[in-house]
Amino acid sequence: MSLREVIARNLSDIQLRMANAARRVGREPSAVRLVAVTKYAQLEWVRELVNLGQKDLGESRPQQLAERSREFGPNVRWHLIGHLQRNKVEIILPRATLIHSVDSWRLLDALQKEAVKLQARARALIEINVSGEASKDGFQIDELRKNSRKLLEYSHIEIAGLMTMAPQSDDPDDARPVFRALHDFRNELTTLTDGGLNIPHLSMGMSGDFEVAIEEGSTLVRIGSSLFAGCEEAEIVRP
Ligand SMILES: *Cc1c(COP(=O)(O)O)cnc(C)c1O
């Protein structure tokens, strides 16, 4: 199979599985968007994917997002999904359609400051460390619960939702309580802020657990490895 065929097959397979997961719980398939994670993908593979019509791409490293956004121009919406250092806010803010990984008050402050300077509005998701693992970035639920109204003070940041990563596991169902907790906390946060926060998005689900995430209300799934499975081999047989 050619590289294009491999990626086309992976993409349609994932889209079908996404739609089926949504239908299983009575959701519209169009309510869930695929963010194709390209952090380990070669440029050539990303080109094929974009040619196939995929518009939302995710990178975890700010530098690589910046480089690739220059390469692809306005056909692509870039999502930053990895940790953002405050000194990289300047390069990311003009380029990212959505920053999924806002994990501290200090980063929120830096985004606000830069957005004011650019007379722009940053779009962000608040990353939550639901499982409380020490190795993970993100706010603790309790921290946000106590200070929820602080989120209303960022005039130049559109807080569009929440993001989380489930602990590593071979069984996708292990992730379900984590995804459910994020969904519940989103609803709680809306109440705590008296509806002052409009936070429709839940960014949750990766290659190993995206169907469970969709069943639990995900609106953005971040999928990398299964989208590009077989690409290495495909290139070898290319003419
Ligand atoms: C790499 C990454 C993904 C994609 O993971 P896959 O298992 O390759 O689908 C999703 N989210 C984040 C934050 C990542 O770093």
Image: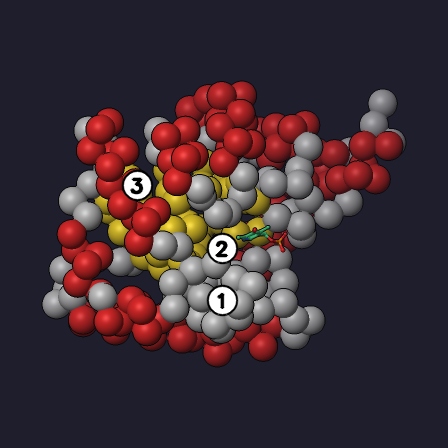
The residue labelled by disc 3 is 110
Which amino acid type is marked by label 3?
A: Ala
The residue located at (54%, 39%) in the rendering is 61
Is disc 2 in contact with disc 1, using a CB cutoff of under 8 Å? yes
Please tell me whether mark 2 or mark 3 is closer to you in this view.
3
Mark with earlier residue (3, 1) = 3
Please tell me whether mark 3 or mark 1 is closer to you in this view.
3
Query: Which of the two residues, 203 or 13, is positioned nearer the viewer here?
Result: 203
Residues at marks 3 and 1, CA–CA distance in whole angstroms: 30 Å
The residue labelled by disc 2 is 221
Label 3 environment density (alpha carbons within 10 Å; few <14, some 14–19, many ≥20): some
Q: Is 28 drawn above or below residue 52 in the view shown?
A: below
Label 1 environment density (alpha carbons within 10 Å; few <14, some 14–19, many ≥20): many
Mark with earlier residue (2, 3) = 3
Quick check: 132 left or right of 118?
Answer: right
Q: Position of residue 96 (x, y in %)?
A: 40, 35
Per the rendering, the mark at residue 53 is none
Quick check: 20 left or right of 114?
Answer: right
Q: Position of residue 201 (x, y in %)?
A: 34, 57
Query: Which of the two residues, 167 or 228, is positioned nearer the viewer here?
Result: 167
Which amino acid type is marked by label 2?
A: Val
Per the rendering, the mark at residue 213 is 1
